[in-house]
Amino acid sequence: MSQGFVHSIKVPRLYKTAATIVKKVAEDGASLKQLIYEKNHPNLKGIYALATTTLQHGTDLNELIRETKLLINEPRLDPWLARVLITELIWGKRTIKGDAKPLHTILNYETKIRQVFETIDQHEKPQSTIKSTERKPRYVRINTLIKKLDEAIEDFQDEGYIFIPRSCTYHEYLDVLSTLDGWKFTQDYHIPELLVFASGTTFYDHLGYKNGAIILQDKASCLPAYLLNPESGSNVLDMCAAPGMKTTHLAAIIDNKGKVFSVERCQRRYEILCNQVSTTHANCVETMNVDAMTLNENKCPDVEYILVDPSCSGSGMQRFTFEGEQSKCAPGRLRSLQSFQVHLLRHALTKFSKVKRVVYSTCSIYPEENEMVVDEVLTNVGDAYKLVPVMTLLNDGWINLSSNEFKCKDNCLYAKPEVDYCNGFFVAVFERNFDVPLPEGRNKNKGLKRNAQDDCDEVDIKEEQSNDVQIDDNGKNLTVKVEESDEPVKKKRKKNKNKCNEVITQEVADEKLKEEDNADVTSKKKIKKEKKIDKSSGDNVDEQEIDINSNEMDIVSKKKHKKKKKDKINEEELIINNENEIISMEIEESNVSSKKKKHKKNKKDSNEGTIIEEGVDEDSTSKKKHKKKKKAKSDIE
Ligand SMILES: C[S@@+](CC[C@H](N)C(=O)[O-])C[C@H]1O[C@@H](n2cnc3c(N)ncnc32)[C@H](O)[C@@H]1O
């Protein structure tokens, strides 16, 4: 630990509070006024002025930060606080007083900032406010396993919401969304059970949310299950299931008739999945804590529909940040993700002889994880599958499609936040041609060295990114990560270590297949769990890249030592994503076990549900809040 930096001088509360408010307004579309009045601060006027000015100069601030490379060179500096301080320096009092470290950092850049400011001023850039299109509406999926859609709409009307009937065309619908405010709500143009409320509408205290009747799920995340559209009574496989948003959507689509095999490799996320399944009364779901690459027809018989929604870069989730440009995904990481995605999708397409339709989705906007994955797999499967043009499935009501430059042409869809008012997303729909036999041979995994820890990490990073976007202004059990947004990915991954630690190669997968064919499934699961826990206590994985090479092994063992130390002092921070409705929770070991108990209890008493976003025990909440406060405090200092 660095000895030179003393965490004693606090950032003035005015700046700290303004930064928190700006963040919430920019990312979540929360109401500025409401947030201001919530704050019990002697200088409300000052905060209001500072926050509004910061928001008004969003574009200029982005440019100033980019040109000065401020956040690149100062990764510990909270970006929101930086914006507030620059605002004070340029448009406010023109000076900042105080001895806290972030203030000094900004002052060190003052000359540079002013120089850049001169140039952007000369260009007479328009000073923008946060555009309404940058605010994501609040999507509420009605869980039709618990409540009928028309009843839900009526209930909301009884609560005072004003229903705008479903639009006739997609363009008309987008117009409605652009003006959706206050108490208005409407029905999604494509997905009937999805209702859309004004940005910032909160439901964390809503009874329906608590009892699983309503699910806060972004439209993008609803598209895969909607497009897979399994028939009631059929068997469905969700290969990458946690935290279970799409699994439970699938269960609702088949009306709990048939079966959803819901597979999650990471144990920590598996527990969350089980909780979500139980809360939402998705009784047709059979959860499996295994690697999807080990699945076959014996384990998941008669599967006709498969959803492949693998870990990805999460680049589609970053739009709602204030950042003008996205943080780029390292090429190595992207390659590794792509290779993993290809293997998983190919497995889905080739190992289940009865499958009719497979949907592949990512919340990435990189062609490397989308068109390029689809193209590669299409080459492997030949004519045994064809892509269904998504445009026809959506009755011509979509705007952004995959690129014609690829083999998959414009058959797949992209959701674009600035157009579709939802997260960035990609979906491809494959349909089986039973006239052509499936290609023979193994799904070779040579060079594929992803492990369960990687998956937990990948998702966590994505979730953290999306969490920055999704924080609810009501904030129940949500973490406002003011200080950490620019923390390097490497560090975040370190934080999110958990029990899963299983290197998956083809050899391992094959061995598992053999073993499992001979073993009773339940006892096998137990053994696996024990194995994982054993490994996690001694092992560790490289935190930077998924492809571990021999040089990195040294680093790994050093990290082992560091991590052990760190683990003792750090509580585990768990961020759950439904890729859209995110919750950040700090979970202590005890919570994990109490969750397990809770899950068991829920199974017994299906009327009592725990809520995924809230999945923390009530009595531990205040403890966590305290810890959270402490952490935020020390970080900002
Ligand atoms: C994008 S998330 C899935 C989100 C989920 N479909 C939902 O809608 O709630 C990807 C998940 O796949 C899991 N995963 C990654 N590789 C896997 C594998 N080989 N087998 C099973 N699960 C895997 C990750 O741990 C992660 O939870």
Image (cartoon, rainbow, N blue to C red):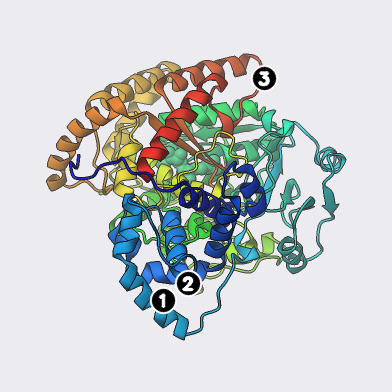
Position of 538 compared to 171: left or right?
Answer: left
Q: Does residue 389 appear in the picture of this structure?
A: no
Position of 471 compared to 96: left or right?
Answer: right
Please tell me whether residue 122 is drawn above or below residue 400 in the rendered image: below
Q: Residue at x 36, y 49 (%)?
A: 340
Tag 2, which secondary structure?
helix
Quarter residue 564 falls in: top left
Q: Identify the mark at residue 117; answer none if there is no mark.
A: 1
Please tell me whether residue 348 is drawn above or below residue 407 in the rendered image: above
Q: Residue at x 35, y 31 (%)?
A: 498
Task: Name the residue furthest bottom.
Answer: 122
Question: Could you tell me if the residues under marks 3 and 2 are in contact, i.e. CB atoms within 8 Å?
Answer: no
The amino acid type, in three-letter code, at marker 3 is Ser
- Residue topped by disc 2: 60
Give coordinates of residue 442: x percent, y percent: 34, 45
Q: CA distance from mark 3 to mark 2?
A: 52 Å
- Residue topped by disc 3: 606
